[in-house]
Amino acid sequence: MTLRHAVVLALLSLTPLPLRADRAEPGSRELKEAPGRAVAPRPPVDSEELLQPALVVPAPSLLLVVPGDLRIAPREGGFVALVPGAGGPSFTAFREDGTIEASLFSPGHAVERWWLSPDGKRVAWVSGGTLYTATAGAKAMDSLGAAPIEDLAFTRDGAHLVFVRDGVAVIRTVADRTERTVRAEPGLLLGGAAVLSADGKTLFALAGPDTPVPDGLARAGAPAADGLASADLTAAEPVLKRCFQASGSTLRTLTLSPDGLSLAFIQAAGKPPEALRLFTPASGDVRTLARAPMIEHPVFTADGSRMAFSGRAANGRMQAWSAATVPDVTKGVYVTRQLAELEGREILHPAPAAGGGFWLLVKDADGKAMRVGRVK
C-alpha cells in the first residue's frame, strides 16, 4: 500500500458530512443550515474532490518531556504538563523548546484530573474525590469540596470555575470563594459538563431525562445526556431548561467557542461513527464538523476557525486532526485534515500552541509511555 493510499484510508473515517437540513427530532429545535450563508452546490460526500489528502503529513518534533497523564495545556509560548516526581506530581510549565520554565504547584498527593485556566495563572484538580485549586507559584491550595462528576470549565478570564456536582450546576467565583448553584427543571438530570457564556448571563449544561434507578442501586457517574439545557442567570431564580435534544443519542464534553456564540460537543448514537457537532444557541443551528469511529479531546483554536481533536483513523489508531468551523464554500463541507503522523505511533490530545501549530501527545512505539510533541 502506498503512503498516499494509507492517508486516503485514514481520512475516509474522518470525512465530514456536507451541510444538510436535518429532520428535527421530537421535542428538539429544528436542525437547519445557518440563515443567510451562501453555499455553493455540494458534491456527494464520496466524490473524488473530497479525497485529495496531502501526499505528506508532517511528522511532529518530539521533546524530552514525559507527562504523567494524558493531558497537556498551552500556556503563553509553551505548555503545562503534570510531571511525576519523588515528592509527588507537579504542575510544571515548559518553554517552547521543552526546557522547564517553572513549577507552578506541587499538591503533595495524587492527581486524578486537572485543568488550567486560560490565562495560565490557576490550576484546578481532583484528588480522592475532592476538588482543589491553587494559584501558580503559590505555597497553599484551596479545597473546594466534592469533586465535579466529570468535567470542569474555567471562564476565559479565569475568574470562575463551572462544573456539575451533586445534581446541580456550580459557578465558583475565585476571588471571594463564593458559589452559586443552579438546578435543572423537573424531569431533567444534568450531565457531566457545564459552561458559562462569554457575558456571564447564560449557563449551559449537558442534560438528559431523569430515568428511574432500581431500588438499592446508586446512580453511577454522570447521567446519560441526550441534549443541552440553558438558564438565564439574570432571572431571580434561574432554572436549567432544555434548549436542544438529540433523541436516540448521547452527548459528552461541552466546549464554548472563543467568540462565545457556539457550543461544541461529541454526539454518539450507540455505535460508530461519533460526530463532532457545533450548536449555536441564538439560532438553534446544529452543524456536523467531523465524523469518526471515536472522537476525544475537542478544543477550539484561539481564533475559533478550527477545532482540534483526537480521532480514531481507519487503521485503528488514534490520531490528531482538525476540522474547520466554517464550511468550504466551494465544497460545502467542513474540511478536516490530519495534523501529524509518525509511523506506528498514536498521536493524541492536540492543544493549540501560541503563534500557530499544536502541542501533541505521542505514544512511544511500545505504547507504554507518552512524549510531548509539536507540529507547526
Image: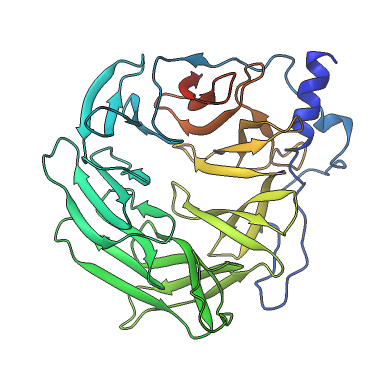
Q: Position of residue 334 (x, y in %)?
A: 69, 41
User: In the rendered image, which quarter is residue 231 located in?
Assistant: bottom left
Q: Which residue is the extreme one toward the left?
A: 139
Q: Is residue 243 above or below residue 376?
A: below
Q: Is residue 170 above or below residue 292?
A: below
Residue at 74 percent across and 46 percent down: it is 39
What's the coloring here? rainbow
Q: Is residue 311 above or below residue 7?
A: below
Residue 37 seen anywhere in this rendered image of the structure = no
Residue 178 seen anywhere in this rendered image of the structure = yes
Query: Can you say which quadrant of the picture contains the N terminus?
Result: top right
Residue at 29 percent across and 57 percent down: it is 130
Q: Is residue 331 left or right of residue 303?
A: right
Residue at 49 percent across and 25 percent down: it is 369
Q: Position of residue 100 (x, y in %)?
A: 27, 19
Q: Is residue 62 left or right of residue 11?
A: left
